[in-house]
Image (cartoon, coloured by chain):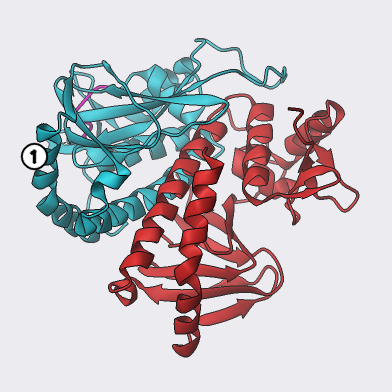
Chain colours: A red, B cyan
Amino acid sequence: MDRNDTTQEVSRYFSDWYKIIDWAKIHFRDRSFTKDERIPTRSGLLYLVERGVLRLVSKGKHSHSIADESIPEDDEPLNEMFLGFIGAGQPFEVVDYPTFELEVYAQVEDTKVIWLYWHDIDNWIIFRRELLDILRYKQKRQMVWLTTLGQRSTIDRLLGFLTLIIEEYGTISESGYCLPYNITHAQISSAIGSTRVTVTRLMGKLRKQGSIVVREDNLICLPQRKK
Amino acid sequence: MDRNDTTQEVSRYFSDWYKIIDWAKIHFRDRSFTKDERIPTRSGLLYLVERGVLRLVSKGKHSHSIADESIPEDDEPLNEMFLGFIGAGQPFEVVDYPTFELEVYAQVEDTKVIWLYWHDIDNWIIFRRELLDILRYKQKRQMVWLTTLGQRSTIDRLLGFLTLIIEEYGTISESGYCLPYNITHAQISSAIGSTRVTVTRLMGKLRKQGSIVVREDNLICLPQRKK
């Protein structure tokens, strides 16, 4: 991933950003959410995170209910899958699909979201254009995400997943790059298609071999790479 | 997924499509590929499929090589993951990432690809705009894909995966909606994080219960849903 490229794209994007925030305020299209509050969403609208972070989750509407003897005994009946975070400045849309529902929650206190109809931005040509760059970037990241989660070894998926979200949302600290908010082992397990118990065990293994650091406040970090 | 919405987006896209094809021909930026030929790609370029279908694959550059006792015995050492198809009219970009490489192959005979630099389309405002709509659609499909592949039960992932690609690329026939080209059990297993042997066994199960139909020419179909 070309980091500089992305940084440039994001900073260009911010040139129009403040105008849109003003527009949203005037049109009563902004709202703040408390930690873990669900954001009411519907398909067809474009949402933008003004500040804070959102957590994207999908919930199955029904299972195919076909018994498969290869399923491990679930240690938690979590019919919910963690699909990633959406940070400040990022757009998102929800999707209607027969077998699951997308839900969005504020990951941190005082997360602010604005929403628009797509036709609202018909005349904001530069904004649309910059949105294209962001979607290009997201599209590429999703390919990385898919490849990471497609690995057969659970510990590879786990370390790959942690690396991905810390690359994207991590901040530098004494312990390395740290995800600045908590993510539970159950959420991690839902993202990588494993169980909470396995994630807890493998996190211990990754800690022991020095691949990750878990701070006292439970934040997960990647030790800084030697150059 | 709103099918009509998508069809509209795609047809608007085609209005500029022929102009771009002409432009690519004049600038020697088009080439045909035979079945299973690899398309030479590099990051930073925008590729468009003029006709035929491409197969997108990721190959690990190295493994984390951490032994995980929970890995099943591999029945094939396939270090390659099937990431989906790219059909006519669709754009794609490749991504550089330290741990894997994206590779693109012609899925069918005489697949034609054109390529552009992003700055080539700076002044094609309508084309850029329509590209945005396509990327929005792809982004939503990828969320569906992620959710489908995140299911813990292998047979759910298998049926979900087949449904997704047949929804997208299938054509109607007497047996229902069929994927118009072959996909191997090894490719399917790499997409859903399973093994070829398991896919073969579960495909048999899905056939028996009537969830899928496999024609004599090996094409995979979804029987038409009763209304």
**Residue A147 sits above or below residue B2 on the image:** above
Q: Which quadrant does the C terminus of chain A fall into?
A: top right
Left or right, A145 with respect to A120, comes to right
Left or right, A54 with respect to A97, comes to right
Q: Position of residue B223 (x, y in %)?
A: 23, 38
Q: Nearer the viewer, residue A35 or A115?
A: A115
Q: Position of residue B32 (x, y in %)?
A: 16, 22
How packed is label 1: few (under 14 Cα within 10 Å), some, or many (20 or more)? few
Q: Name the residue at 14% across, 22% down.
A: B110
Q: Chain of mark 1?
A: B
Residue A96 in sight from this viewpoint: no
Which picture quadrant has residue A23?
A: bottom left
Q: Name the residue at 40% across, 48% down.
A: A136
Left or right, B53 with respect to B22, comes to right
Q: Position of residue B140 (x, y in %)?
A: 39, 53
Which picture quadrant has residue B209?
A: top left
Q: Which residues are magenta?
A: B178-182
Q: Nearer the viewer, residue B13 or A201?
A: B13
Q: Name the residue at 51% across, 75% down.
A: A18
